[in-house]
Amino acid sequence: MACQSSDELKVLVEEARTCAKSGKVADYIPALGKANPDDLSIAIYYPDGRCVSAGDVEKKFTLQSVSKVISLALVLMDRGPDYVFEHVGMEPTGEPFNSIGKLETTAPSKPLNPMINSGALVVTHMIKGDTVEERLQRLLSFIQEMASHTKIGYNEEIARSEFKTAHLNRALCYFLKQHNILDEDVEQLIDLYTKQCAIEMNCLDLARIGMVFAMDGRDPLSGKQIMPVDVARICKTFMVTCGMYNESGEFAIKIGIPAKSGVSGGIMGAVPGRFGIGIFGPALGEKGNSVAGMRLLELLSKNYQLSMF
């Protein structure tokens, strides 16, 4: 479905775009370093099927850490909350998303939450299936259903680039393995995780997924309950408390909606009961969030009273 261009959103996009110059693209993953830092686009998807947008919303980008909240939803459905939270905690952290430090000072040494890399690796480890391909396909099918787009796949070049440079994530896996949080071959898990992070879509797809979370796991267009209400609630709570890395508290005060960012510059927002938001702006601030995307959400929240607080 095509998104209708919105003059109101265009004005906000142009205002927010000026912030992009203060950020930089994530070049520590070489393939992500090719992004244009001035890109900024947004789509908003409503439960009645309407969609409004501004910027180049058809441009594809990889989910990166946005995938963490989706894999969490799948694993909560696979394993149940009791099992999942035996292995990963529920607490926010003031540490960077790729930190190993908190694992060493926490007993037992389980990750504090599913939105930091160590926690996300544990969650991905729990995706059911006998092979990397089978597990990835289960996650892709889940994403395709939420986005109502069967052609969504992953970017092989970015997955390869991430796999080659995932040394810190390997270190996290070996630490977790030492403490019996993981019991899987590390290279196999890194293969699955980097492909998960490299799942690729556009702003419209991301906004539609955000809309499913916003509507408590139900796709109002198909009428299907894609995930249980409680799973959607848990995921949205993590998006509020941990979704924007160690900038989540400031984000909650300034913007106040459930959202999840990724280092590609994607942000998925879920305004409870109202609509889903998909944003792409690859210039990142020092905490790993899209600087122009954050500013755009701040303008939206103020103009349309989106904060849930």
Image: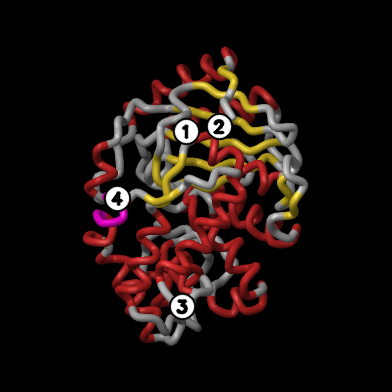
Q: Per the image, is 160 magenta?
A: yes
Decide: few, some or many residues near mark 2? Use Cα within 10 Å; few <14, some 14-19, many ≥20. many
Q: Main secondary structure of the magenta part?
A: helix
Q: Is disc 3 in contact with disc 4, using a CB cutoff of under 8 Å? A: no
Q: Is disc 4 in contact with disc 1, using a CB cutoff of under 8 Å? A: no
Asked which quadrant contains residue 70, the reply is bottom right
The three-letter code of the residue at mark 2 reads Leu
Residue placed under numbered mark 1 in the picture: 293
Q: Determine whether 50 is above or below 248 in the image.
A: above
Residue placed under numbered mark 4 in the picture: 158
What percent of the width, then of the height, locates residue 167? 25, 66
The secondary element bearing badge 4 is classed as helix
Q: Nearer the viewer, residue 202 or 30?
A: 202
Front of the two marks 3 and 2 = 3
Q: Is disc 1 in contact with disc 2, using a CB cutoff of under 8 Å? A: yes
In screen coordinates, is 101 left or right of 119?
left
Residue, x 40% and y 40% (percent of image)? Answer: 61
Q: CA gap, disc 1 to disc 2?
A: 6 Å
